[in-house]
Image (cartoon, rainbow, N blue to C red):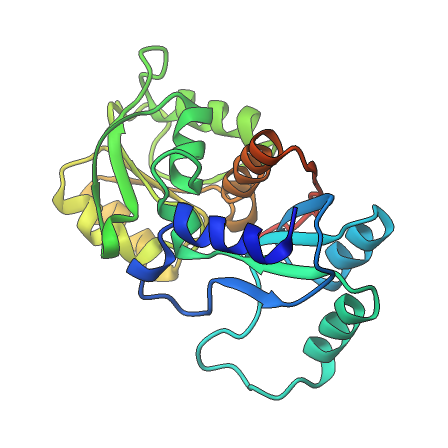
Amino acid sequence: MPLNELEIYLNQLLDVGNFRDYCPNGLQVEGRSAVHQLISGVTASFDFLQTAVAAGADAVLVHHGYFWRGEDQCIVGMKHRRIALLMAHDVGLLSYHLPLDAHSKLGNNVQLGQKMGFAETSRFGDQNIAMQGTLPPHITNLKDLRICIEHALCRTPLVIGEDAKTVRRVAWCTGAAQDYFDEAISLGVDVFITGEISERNVHAARESGVAFISAGHHATERYGVQALGEHLSQKFGIAHRFIDIDNPV
């Protein structure tokens, strides 16, 4: 598939023009003109790129790419090493941040909710990225939820709250969405799940009675890019492989 046609399709599918983001969405580094092998991953780290190149990638598709707002624009050091590797092997880099978080079928939040069995009821937060809903019937308390998260994401989450706390209504947003906690509290949910936690969130959870679960930035954002890659593979007949580079955060 032509790389430029792939980018056009993704930009339209993810509605990138309607998002105010911290980085450019779309093709960040141009590569060879035709894509037969697409490799997806969470972050375009050097380890990921090396593995993708070894796997025969024509292009890589990630959630965390480059050129973030406020970062040094000079292509030196770590950024040069990464981009030089892509250019040396003529591998394109496609990156989608908030548009991938928010997509109604392939997005990180929808995919995490489906993996956990959550039933979405509404959205909230900036640009309606975060979600709220109900937990599956077999999850009745915070301990049940912690165990389910641990099994589903293959990591032990940090939980602020008592195991015996009854939980039914849940709000969630993947990645570093701890700033949405106050809004989640105001919605009257029993528990809020995101990837990262800040010091202030601990006190807010204790004082509000709303449990806070930090399940890992990387761990919560593995599923949108996989779903998107599989969608592209099925629609256009290109090969797709997801490569997971472990990250404890």
Position of 73 compared to 84: left or right?
A: left
Q: In percent of the image, x 82 and y 54: which residue is there?
A: 53
* Visible residue check, residue 207: yes
- How many marks the image carries: the answer is 0
Residue drawn 24% across and 49% down? 128
Q: Is residue 162 above or below residue 88?
A: above
Q: Give x and y (percent) for residue 143.
A: 41, 24
Name the foreground residue: 29 vs 244: 29
The correct choice, above or below, for 50 with respect to 211 in the image is below
Query: Residue 63 in the image: x percent, y percent?
Result: 53, 54
Whether 57 is drawn above or below 4: the answer is above
Q: Quadrant of residue 141?
A: top left
Residues 225 and 213: in front is 225
The residue under the point 44% across, 77% down is 69
* Horizontal relation, residue 214 to residue 72: left or right: left
Horizontally, is 209 left or right of 94 in the view?
A: left
Above or below, comparing residue 62 to residue 46 in the picture: above
